Amino acid sequence: MPRAVLPKLLLPLLGLVAATVADCPSSAWVQFKDSCYIFLEEAIKVESIEDVRNQCTDHGADMISIHNEEENAFILNTLKKQWKGPDDILLGMFYDTDDASFKWFDSSNMTFDKWEDQDAEDLVDTCGFLHTKTGEWKKGNCEVSSVEGTLCKAAIPYNKKYLSDNHILISTLVIASTVILTVLGAIIWYLYKRNSNSGFTTVFSTTPQSHYDDDCVLVVAEENECAVGFD
């Protein structure tokens, strides 16, 4: 079997491994714990924050929500190193005047905040912004006319999010074993075919040298015609 055929045999298995490991929709997304994040770098003109939100929902996600310091630091670090975002990023939150509190658009609980010190102000039509230089949040007017990029977040699908560690480990071991067995099988098949094509070249030894002298012929009918030499 030609060597070039071996990688072709492994492609389906490698694809299976990638599908098992990759929980986000594509390589454009970045995974952190049980969520996937993407920064849409396109600058757009908008009439309301709903236009910004639609950028995310069109990708099966929602505007960013942040629930602890670790997630806030991850987003800040990724914005600086990978996404190269602007100084201020719209967070997916709004001020609900009905109960006088901020809420996330994705309906998750408001369990964390990182507001910078600001003077008291009217919070009607107020949204939150992540200041990428400090990691603190700022209050600002929701009525923006344009954005220089949109930060979106999507939860990993239920069937992937809740796989147990044991299940993932077993799946990984099964895939690795399959890959190893496939490679060994391909190598054995290649060696077998190579030997088959070259034919059997076993060389049999010549007839053993007679114990009798080369100059004598043993003739049963004639006695003592020549001496018989034994070792």
Image: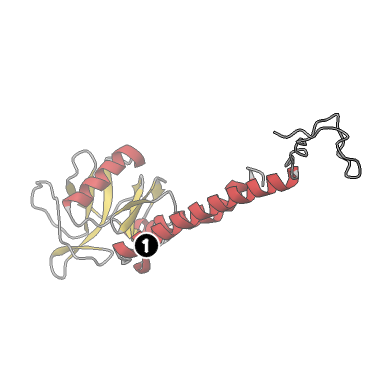
The kind of residue tagged 1 is Ile
- When the figure is inspected, residue 217 is found, relative to residue 65, above or below; the finding is above
Q: Is residue 31 left or right of residue 118?
A: right
The extreme top residue here reads 215
Tell me where residue 158 appears, x and y as whole percent: 34, 68
Q: Residues within 10 Å of mark 1 (few under 14, many from 20)?
A: few
| Residue toward you, 134 or 228 | 228
Q: Is residue 118 left or right of residue 103?
A: left
Residue 156 appears in the rendering: no
Tell me where residue 16 appears, x and y as whole percent: 48, 58
- When the figure is inspected, residue 174 is found, relative to residue 211, above or below; the finding is below
Tell me where residue 163 appears, x and y as whole percent: 33, 66
Secondary structure beneath dot 1 equals helix
- Residue beneath the point at 87% across and 36% down: 217
Residue 195 appears in the rendering: yes
Q: Is residue 72 left or right of residue 28?
A: left
Quarter holding residue 171? bottom left
Quarter holding residue 83? top left
The extreme right residue here reads 221
The extreme front residue here reads 223
The residue identified by callout 1 is: 170
Quarter holding residue 99? bottom left
Tell me where residue 141 appears, x and y as whole percent: 23, 53
| Residue toward you, 177 or 50 | 177
Quarter of the image for the C terminus: give it: top right
- When the figure is inspected, residue 79 is found, relative to residue 155, above or below; the finding is above
